[in-house]
Amino acid sequence: MMTTDSEQSTSPESGSVSIRADELAGLVEGRLVGNPELILTELASIEDGSPGSLTFIRSKNFANLWSDSSCSAALVTQGVDVPGHDPETRALIFVPDADIAVIKILEAIKPKPSAPGVGIHPSATVHPDAQIHPEASIGPGCVVCQGAAIASGVVLVANAYIGQDAQIGQDTILHPGVVVGDRCVVGDRGLIFANCVIGADGFGFLTATKDRPVTKVPQIGTVEIGDDVEIGACSTIDRAKFGVTRVGHRTKVDNQVHIAHNCIVGNDVLLCGRTTLGGSSTIGDRTMIGGAVVLNDQATVGEDVKIAGGAIVLDEIPRGETVLGVPAMPARTALANAAASRNLAKFCRRVEKTLKKLDPDYNNSS
Amino acid sequence: MMTTDSEQSTSPESGSVSIRADELAGLVEGRLVGNPELILTELASIEDGSPGSLTFIRSKNFANLWSDSSCSAALVTQGVDVPGHDPETRALIFVPDADIAVIKILEAIKPKPSAPGVGIHPSATVHPDAQIHPEASIGPGCVVCQGAAIASGVVLVANAYIGQDAQIGQDTILHPGVVVGDRCVVGDRGLIFANCVIGADGFGFLTATKDRPVTKVPQIGTVEIGDDVEIGACSTIDRAKFGVTRVGHRTKVDNQVHIAHNCIVGNDVLLCGRTTLGGSSTIGDRTMIGGAVVLNDQATVGEDVKIAGGAIVLDEIPRGETVLGVPAMPARTALANAAASRNLAKFCRRVEKTLKKLDPDYNNSS
Amino acid sequence: MMTTDSEQSTSPESGSVSIRADELAGLVEGRLVGNPELILTELASIEDGSPGSLTFIRSKNFANLWSDSSCSAALVTQGVDVPGHDPETRALIFVPDADIAVIKILEAIKPKPSAPGVGIHPSATVHPDAQIHPEASIGPGCVVCQGAAIASGVVLVANAYIGQDAQIGQDTILHPGVVVGDRCVVGDRGLIFANCVIGADGFGFLTATKDRPVTKVPQIGTVEIGDDVEIGACSTIDRAKFGVTRVGHRTKVDNQVHIAHNCIVGNDVLLCGRTTLGGSSTIGDRTMIGGAVVLNDQATVGEDVKIAGGAIVLDEIPRGETVLGVPAMPARTALANAAASRNLAKFCRRVEKTLKKLDPDYNNSS
């Protein structure tokens, strides 16, 4: 029998499951070519899988690995030709989009996450003037301050802190140790991972002069996070000096990302692990930024930009550009420069040797 | 009527406020040139503001934007000439230093942060042998261990942990989830943001040999943080192997900064977001370090140094130097090299083409 | 009398201690050459120590500093010759390995860390179906979910969260604020520092197309941490998409390290501060990686590799290699290129000047 959310047989260590090929085809509304009675017990990559594994084939490159793969079944994007399939012993399930079909399966088999029950846990500390929707779950050790508003379906898993007048939108989940500072706003259906900090003070100081030490500029602004946003563990999003630090709808932020005060991050943006946005930098809609990227203060990145991991953005990247490197440059130039860099010592030696031969006055120590 | 800390009308989302131009001039002891009855409702940059906005003009560059700005009023540093001002409809307030005046206003209007009341919250766990000053506030879920000393005016907001024999100085505020390890010391008037960890073990191991695996070196030292220090969210400052990891007075540390064991950071230092100090590195007084900088283990940086974001410091930066790049070099050399780097591929092609022409024996594949 | 764990006289600020030279020699089973009655009160480096300091001499370089050092005593690796020793006033203690002897002493004098008592603290929240060994310590504010298993000798110091069906092995210590997600497994004798997050979701999304927004791929895998592993404060180790993210036995991970979904980190690996491993990257046994290194998604690093701090690894590093740079290259090539880079602007000017002289058609603007 097929197993789903409510009746799963998932093993603790790997999210494995037991399902027949024909049931699987039904679940994803796909066309089965192969043995309907095969039992599939896990998801795996086409190279790593073994008998019982279900994999996916989204392109010709994957399809060419099928005949040598040990996987028992594959979800295949319609239109991809899969050579060497034996329908007696294995199964292919054709669907409009194999990636989407995998998501459907993962959704069906995913274990229900641990969460406190609806209501306020007796060990939580909730101010009498906070508004807690009766369908919200406030887990053990959570603190909700005066004037905060917690909407329906919200889950504060444990030890989370919601500051004064802060707002958490419907069905948003805050993992343990998340801190949302005073007056900050998180939208609906958000997913904020453990120990993330939203609304610490921006790093704003007047530098020292002869007459005064370094002087703090009070940071009185807030943070506003849109709907359907995901933010990774130990990421930090600082409040604005005044006004708002904003993260747009459907934007996804990985772990240990730092978004400084007054940044404006658009909708549908992806920010990979450990990326740092300097103060007042802006990022346009649908831009994708790799890991460990640094944006200078005030940098402006347009819409639909792609920035490769490790890049440093000094000032401006126009709409639609793909950039990489230190400093970030258009990919073609950056790759050519990187290739030249890799052989730089050799190039320099060769050139100097030739120049000394050609020009008796050439002096490489000048 | 003017609104201040105690009687503010701040809106939850942006720290806005309502104040008349002449009241504002009084608050900052400035000279008003313009309409005294203008109502100002928010702080904004000179470019982004709208009617009702107060902005600041600290230099000629800002002054030149005034005639086109929609802001109603500006704080102006005395001596800066502001062309195109219409005192009938707008207001300028001249002060000795516009930046300082802005800080005065922000201080006056800033919302009071959420904080637990004075005393020990019933959900906190305080060892009977800890010394808690009666004027300290120990918030919900906090843990204070044996022998720890919490001075007058200290606020542990929530879920903070103060280890055995640790000391927290007067009026220091620890945001939720801050951890101060055993025997570590934080000075007076500190501000430590959420989930910061002070006093985890230094990363000290004997590397593996044929005869033994990687072996931990016990880290028995401590951390000492001076007075008036600010430390950002999710930053980590490790205890010394033996002796002390030290952060000087008035030093400001941004989010996600890592200060390894046995570092000595001077007074009045600024460390921007995600900077990493390797073990036993030292930083002189008044040095400013940009974001995502890396200092090697044992690196020594002198006083009054400036290090640009993204630099990697291998060994030593002398007093007063301004450096950038990988590895960090004096700014002039680094900028010249960076400029050459950006055109490296083109330069190499051009040189090789010419050398082939000049020298029939030149071989760029050698 | 010698002081040890149970009867220490450690001062709060520096782990200092009081011990006679002959007692010390007994403790490390070493051969004393010098005054047996010297009182040693602290550990120090050979350059920084003062009378009363004990230091260590592991090589000729250290030995040559002995005559000018103010330290009273030193642990010396047998076979190292120490010139200028006066056995009347100072003491040398010869041992097979001075580093190991220092560890023995640190172990003997290290203060006992703060820890909750055995049993479940009344402010902890433990699901009735969790298995807590009677010899485990569950500190204040901790949360242990349904099906979780906490072995003998485990210490959850405070405010830690153990998800559903998660497992914590014998004698493992979790510092305050550590989060172990559902179904994740931590081995025996582990040491996990504060606010570390194990088992947040991997950063897995289908990028947006015309027909659909960015779409989350459910992350149903887990994390498995081996035995004798140390993980630093605010580090994050994400769960696998499906299958397992694995950290091998005896591997040591510094602060603020990010290990993405589906990484496989071998045994006896060292990962220094702020290093980031991209999704599905792998690291072989005994490899050592410096600080702030970035591994691209799917990068594969072999066994016994050394990677210098700040490197970016694009794809593959073979077994035994030592690499550095951006991108990471074998050390010899990288150092030669780095040296050439440092003088690049000068080199370019010199070459262009000569080429213009030699070739009237040479045009450096082309």
Image (spheres, coloured by chain):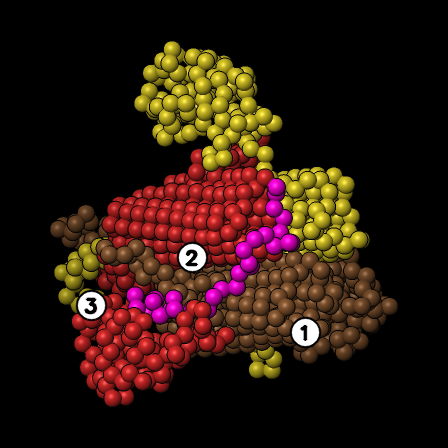
Chain colours: A red, B yellow, C brown
Task: Say if labels 3 and 1 share a chain.
Answer: no
Residue A49: quarter of image: bottom left
**Residue B226 magenta-highlighted:** no
In the picture of the structure, the residue carrying the numbered disc 2 is A254
Please, what is the three-letter code of the amino acid marked with disc 1? His
In the picture of the structure, the residue carrying the numbered disc 3 is B363
Q: Residue at x 63, y 73 (%)?
A: C131
**Residue A112 magenta-highlighted:** yes
> Which chain is indicated by disc 2?
A
The correct choice, above or below, for B254 with respect to C314 in the image is above
Mark 3 Cα within 10 Å, few/some/many (few <14, many 20+)? few
Residue C133 disc label: 1
Task: Say if labels 2 and 1 share a chain.
Answer: no
> Which chain is indicated by disc 3?
B
C337 or B283, nearer to the observer: B283
Mark 2 Cα within 10 Å, few/some/many (few <14, many 20+)? many
